[in-house]
Image (cartoon, rainbow, N blue to C red):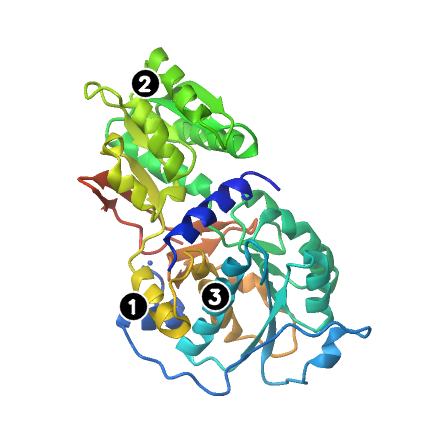
Amino acid sequence: MKLWAGSIWAARLGHAAQRIASAVPARNVALAGAALLAAGCQVIPKTDVATTAPPAPAPEPSATALPTDTGRHRIALLVPMSGDTGPVGQAIANATTMALLDTGADNLRITTYDTSAGIGGAAQKAIADGNKLILGPMTSDAVPAVQMAARPAGVPVIAFANDASVASADVFVIGHLPEQSIRRTVQYARGKGAGRFAVLAPEGDYGTRAVSVLENALRDFGGALVRRESYARGNTSIVSAAARLRAAGGYDTVLIADSARLGVDAAGELNKSSRNRTRILGTELWSGDAALTRAASLEGALFAAVSDQRYARFADSYAARFGGQPYRVATLGYDAVLLTLRVARDWKVGTPFPKNELYDKGGFLGVDGAFRFGRGGVIERALEVREVRGGEVVPVDPAPTGFGK
């Protein structure tokens, strides 16, 4: 599993488990679920809205276990329902159901396929059942197996992964991409006087990508990368790397390309002295982590993430329906359904999913704000910049509300 969408992403899910208990064109505001949440409307679930359980294993194609349905589009949701990541998969599945209920949609049948026993088999069942669109999988390393089953059938995939490298003409990556967070933060920091940058990045693919994104951002926005230090994840070596960086000096800003917990450890070393404090930059992995507010060494730290403006209402609605707080990534399932509903307005039941409708330059609106897809299938999100200030994390540069043409 690639670190970019594997262990780093899994680390974020681990932190989430500890916490558990945009101007968009008017035609796209028809994504009513997010609008309902924003308006605080109460929606009475329709009794004819349902998601189906995974088909029982059988020697014949599992389509025989599903009733004929000529009035609804068949959509497959591929997530784990057991194992370590089972609770996350269940939260995403719950969120897709919630999106159907909130919007009163009666033209989609979403069937959940458990990937715990094997992603390839789940994908093959989904195709055999006649699904015309796949939502999932959760991680980038599972995308090839899904694509192998879906591509011959002409079925596109909207993957919850956060690795842009798996995107293609038939795989749309809807996850939160660290690359975009780093770029947005660097642009803002440059506007605030940051000029000489250093980076602390983990060994492996994630670290290599983070450094590359930083270099590209500095090439576009100005500034210089004067030093980099790498470390092995999972131990205290980030503190040693930070000590080496502090001893070398010559920078005014440091990007810590890792989780909030490790960010706190590294910042404590970098800002041991109250004099000549270093400006710290993080990534979207820091979003929602309360540890940031308890670390004096992170005062003034900046990072970019999707806006939480609509998330609180989403979380409250989720808790009312399912009895607990959702994982933060559950919004991906909700927004994927809103996106599908937007496209389904002109989609005839039984025909291929019109994936070209996903390339709307004006973008779409979801719980996580405005987003759109580039031709390569990579999502572009409107991100806000946040600052750690006085024991709080406050937005200092709002997310754009939409995209230009």
Of marks 3 and 1, which one's residue comes earlier in the chain?
A: 1
Q: Mark 3 points at which residue?
A: 339
Q: Which residue lies furthest to the top in this view?
A: 248
How dense is the environment of label 1, judged by Cα within 10 Å: few (below 14), some, or many (20 and up)?
A: some
* Left or right relative to 258: residue 395: left
Of marks 2 and 1, which one's residue comes earlier in the chain?
A: 1
Q: Quadrant of residue 392?
A: top left
* Left or right relative to 348: residue 289: left
Name the secondary structure under disc 3: helix
Mark 3 vs mark 2: give the one in front.
2
Q: Mark 2 points at which residue?
A: 251
Q: What residue type is labelled 1?
A: Ala
Of marks 3 and 2, which one's residue comes earlier in the chain?
A: 2
Name the secondary structure under disc 2: loop
Identify the image quadrant of the C terminus. Answer: bottom left
Q: Mark 1 points at which residue?
A: 38
Q: In which quarter of the image is residue 250?
A: top left
- In this view of the protein, can residue 183 be seen by the observer? no
- In this view of the protein, can residue 111 be seen by the observer? yes
Most foreground residue, 97 or 379: 97
Q: Are marks 3 and 1 in contact (CB under 8 Å)?
A: no
Most foreground residue, 277 or 91: 91
Residue 106 location in percent, x, y? 50, 82
